């Protein structure tokens, strides 16, 4: 749903100092990492700033659409409300577009924000073409449910509407994001491994995105057409699992970037940080091997990718530990929206990871797991957005609403996730709504009631983020 350092520079970091840590480079170049302090990231002027600004607008617009649809989803599954407003027929169509906007579009758009900010000024035409296609595809996707024949298929990762307009939107978005990934691979190539850890990590996230897009295309080319739900499940299976590595890498980058902005850079050397990013990305080498060894869409293919998720993500362990140390380092920093987002992000991502190892059977523990994980990523991106706003020429996000927004959103999602996990323990099935949920026992009703309450609070927190961003982005510094 919408809405997953140790050397203290000063005991208290003011808002002014927080943002003055980042000074824009005077000349656009391939390397936008400060060579004096490689733990601090700067953004080159010109194309990188303009492109990052555009991609951020696209991400915020996707969240607005996703948040509106989230209200329908929460109401359609909340005991009492579901009987007053029979929204079952809208549930599945809204769920498809909601998930695609809040995960696929928002995550990829913000990934492009980071790629543009860390990358150089080259290949501007490719960058703007990619943005234009992604924006067009997002607009088409948003209106596709209003065209006839929009039959929803609730497969994992990228659910679809069996409708030509929706499929056209996927292809257009795919072309746009592919250009963004290709440009990132070229403009973020780390020239100094030991001195550019953020470039290394960001480049590896683009490699993960490239493998994911290649997996999607390979599966589309090789998987024979079978029963619709199974077909789309296997079509997006390999690429969807691969995208998780992109999101996880960018989440850690967002954490460390935020920590640096708050005056607490990572408590390791640049060389060690670069090495940790490489270790976390090692499982990506298995992706092409799986496609070469077994037929795409076969049972062994799906089992291998499930194993890759289970055994590959622990390679992120050292980076997660580093994130925990950075979080401990910012504990005494004054109230700041980026700090709030860091705290909430780490808590939700950790909860989602724990729930992932508690899945038994097909029930709502599964969405509890991925809501925790994906919301952890979303909150990390929200925190980095607060840091980047003034660096991209917008107003600083400040005030009580900005500081409390991540906590409201995170608390709502926490109750939502715990409600789903509780209900899953009592056998409530996933991807159903209304009377189909068969809520017959009091524990089931309590759990889904928690889900509904937490979801509504999370929607409020998500809308708060949009309001804060729109307020800041409506003002451009001269």
Image (cartoon, rainbow, N blue to C red):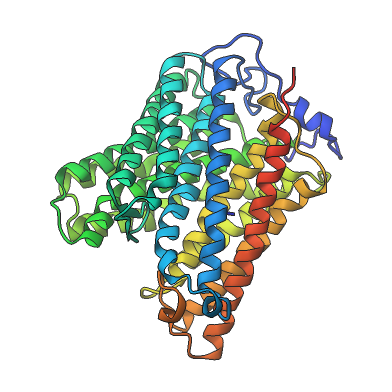
Rendered location of residue 95, percent (x, y) = 44, 59
Determine if residue 1 is in view: no
Rendered location of residue 265, percent (x, y) = 69, 35
Task: Describe residue 49's horizontal placement relative to residue 235 as left or right.
Answer: right
- Res. 272 image quadrant: top right
Rendered location of residue 387, percent (x, y) = 69, 35
Determine if residue 299 is in view: yes
**Depth order, front residue of 286/424:** 424
169 over 83 or under it: above or below: above
Q: Quadrant of the C terminus?
A: top right
At 59% from the left and 83% from the top, the residue drawn is: 446
Looking at the image, the residue that sits furthest to the top is 27
Count the marks: how many? 0
**Depth order, front residue of 394/247:** 394
**Depth order, front residue of 177/467:** 467
At 64% from the left and 37% from the top, the residue drawn is: 385
- Res. 348 image quadrant: bottom right
381 over 373 or under it: above or below: above
Looking at the image, the residue that sits furthest to the bottom is 441
At 74% from the left and 26% from the top, the residue drawn is: 21
**Depth order, front residue of 158/253:** 158
Rendered location of residue 115, percent (x, y) = 50, 29
Task: Describe residue 77's horizontal placement relative to residue 151 as left or right.
Answer: right
């Amino acid at each position: 749903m919408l809405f997953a350092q140790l050397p203290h520079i000063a005991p208290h970091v003011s808002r002014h100092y927080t943002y003055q840590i980042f000074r824009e480079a005077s000349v656009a170049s391939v390397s936008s990492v400060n060579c004096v302090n490689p733990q601090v990231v700067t953004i080159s002027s010109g194309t990188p700033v303009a492109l990052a600004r555009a991609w951020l607008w696209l991400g915020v617009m996707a969240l607005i659409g996703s948040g509106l649809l989230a209200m329908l989803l929460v109401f359609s599954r909340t005991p009492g409300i579901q009987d007053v407003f029979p929204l079952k027929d809208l549930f599945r169509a809204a769920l498809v577009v909601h998930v695609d906007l809040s995960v696929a579009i928002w995550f990829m758009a913000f990934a492009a924000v980071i790629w543009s900010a860390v990358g150089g000024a080259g290949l501007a035409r490719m960058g703007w073409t990619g943005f234009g296609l992604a924006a067009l595809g997002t607009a088409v996707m948003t209106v596709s449910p209003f065209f006839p024949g929009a039959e929803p298929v609730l497969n994992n990762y990228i659910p679809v509407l069996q409708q030509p307009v929706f499929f056209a939107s996927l292809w257009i978005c795919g072309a746009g994001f592919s250009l963004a990934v290709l440009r990132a691979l070229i403009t973020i190539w780390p020239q100094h491994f030991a001195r550019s850890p953020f470039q290394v990590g960001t480049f590896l996230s683009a490699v993960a995105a490239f493998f994911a897009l290649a997996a999607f295309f390979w599966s589309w080319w090789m998987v024979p057409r079978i029963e619709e739900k199974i077909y789309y499940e296997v079509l997006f299976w390999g690429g969807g699992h691969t995208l998780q590595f992109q999101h996880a890498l960018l989440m850690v980058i967002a954490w460390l970037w935020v920590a640096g902005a708050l005056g607490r850079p990572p408590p390791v050397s640049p060389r060690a940080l670069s090495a940790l990013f490489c270790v976390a990305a090692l499982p990506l080498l298995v992706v092409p091997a799986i496609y070469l060894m077994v037929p795409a869409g076969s049972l062994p293919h799906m089992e291998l990718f499930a194993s890759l998720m289970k055994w590959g993500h622990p390679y992120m362990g050292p980076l997660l530990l580093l994130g925990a140390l950075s979080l401990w380092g910012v504990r005494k920093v004054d109230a700041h929206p980026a700090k709030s987002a860091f705290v909430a992000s780490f808590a939700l991502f950790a909860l989602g990871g724990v729930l992932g190892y508690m899945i038994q059977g097909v029930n709502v523990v599964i969405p509890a797991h991925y809501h925790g994980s994906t919301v952890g990523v979303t909150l990390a991106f929200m925190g980095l957005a607060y840091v980047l706003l003034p660096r991209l020429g917008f107003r600083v996000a400040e005030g009580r609403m900005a500081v409390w927004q991540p906590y409201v959103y995170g608390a709502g999602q926490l109750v939502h996730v715990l409600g789903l996990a509780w209900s899953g323990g009592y056998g409530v099935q996933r991807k159903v709504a209304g009377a189909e949920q068969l809520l017959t026992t009091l524990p089931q009703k309590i759990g889904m009631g928690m889900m509904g309450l937490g979801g509504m609070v999370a929607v409020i927190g998500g809308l708060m983020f949009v309001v804060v961003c729109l307020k800041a982005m409506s003002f451009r510094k001269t």
